[in-house]
Image (tube, rainbow, N blue to C red):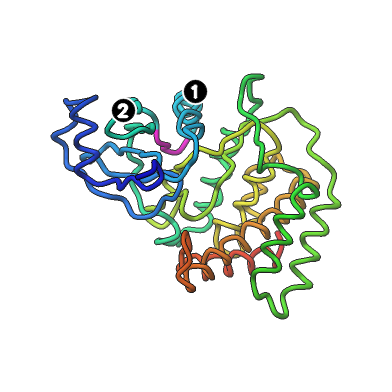
Amino acid sequence: MSDTEIEITADLVRDLLQEQHPDLAGLAIREVAGGWGNQMWRLGDELAVRMQRMDPTPELQLKERRWLPVLAPRLPLPVPTRVRFGEPSGRFPKHWTVMTWVPGEPLDHGSISRGAHAADTLAGFLRALHVEAPAEAPIATDRGAHPKNCTDGFDYFFDAVALDDLADDVRAVWDDAVAAPEWEGPPVWVHGDLHPANVVVSDGTLSGIVDFGDMFAGDPALDLAAAWVLLPAGTASRFFDTYAHADEAAIRRARGLAAMKSLFLMLMGQNGDQGLPGGKPHWGPVGRAALDRVLKGV
């Protein structure tokens, strides 16, 4: 059995804890639905175990281990932070990490009813996150680029999803983003993967941000795309007013990247409908709703 075929079960998680962190092995273990590169298990009420699954290298977990303790103290929403390290062993030859559990419901299974509050909350979180990163901060290799350098990815999603009468409008949003000026500021910390499965909600608003494996230093526009991907219709303007640091070019880039992210969500939904690996049927309507918000602008 290859590494990628190892079945991760509650018994395996408990065995690993018993071997490396026996004081935690008596806590209840429950699988968390979702996850692709990593699989999550609840550990008691306040912890989680993040198990490397499909990610070919431990880079994303190691990045979270290194940098989340640096970022978390200044962030105004709960984020997962490391508690214990799990090292590769004969029982499981990959990395795993015990982290704090961020309570709430993933947005792709929940909803936001307090739109203004959520817009202010997301803007405040990103203002706190988007500060100049140190020279040794990770740099993105496959995301976070200017839209003009992402045309292959956009075209792939655009061609794979049936847009019907929306196609021309979506293409126009993308072309405008491609034509927008580049980011001229210093590289800032960027979450890098803000979509509905990576934020949690409670009481009708955002209550936590998870999965920082794609964090990098660069252009904040990719995170600003969340104004359309995450927030309810009609709240993008309030978000940008509260965020207060996005010029017209950043908003144009962000809107194009939001269109691309929406198409990705729609494609994952389409794949789920077809029973393809990694597909998520419930992401289709989420992506389509996000695309409708993108087309309405700020």
Q: Position of residue 38 (x, y in %)?
A: 41, 43
Label 1 CA crowd tier, 10 Å (few <14, some 14–19, many 20+): few
Q: Secondary structure at mark 1?
A: helix
Q: What residue is drawn where x is 17% and y is 42%?
A: 28
Upstream in sequence: badge 1 or badge 2: 1
Front residue of 1/190: it is 1
Residue extending farthest left: 26
Residue extending farthest top: 135
Give the answer, above or below, for where 119 lies relative to 102. Answer: below
Residue 89: give its label.
2
Q: Secondary structure at mark 2?
A: loop
Q: Report how far apart the C-alphas of labels 1 and 2 lie in the structure.
A: 28 Å
Is disc 1 in contact with disc 2, using a CB cutoff of under 8 Å?
Answer: no
Q: Amino acid at mark 2?
A: Ser
User: What span is in magenta?
Assistant: 76-80
Q: Position of residue 46 (x, y in %)?
A: 26, 37
Q: Position of residue 132 (x, y in %)?
A: 66, 26
Label 2 CA crowd tier, 10 Å (few <14, some 14–19, many 20+): few
Q: Amino acid at mark 1?
A: Val
Front residue of 72/261: it is 261
Name the image quarter holding residue 61.
Answer: top left
Give the answer, above or below, for where 114 lies relative to 80. Answer: below
Q: Main secondary structure of the magenta part?
A: loop
Q: How many marks?
A: 2
Give the answer, above or below, for where 27 lies relative to 175. Answer: above
Q: Is residue 201 left or right of residue 223?
A: left
Name the residue carrying label 1: 70
- Residue 77 part of the magenta-drawn span: yes
Please identify, in this view, whether the residue under mark 1 or under mark 2 is nearer the observer: 2
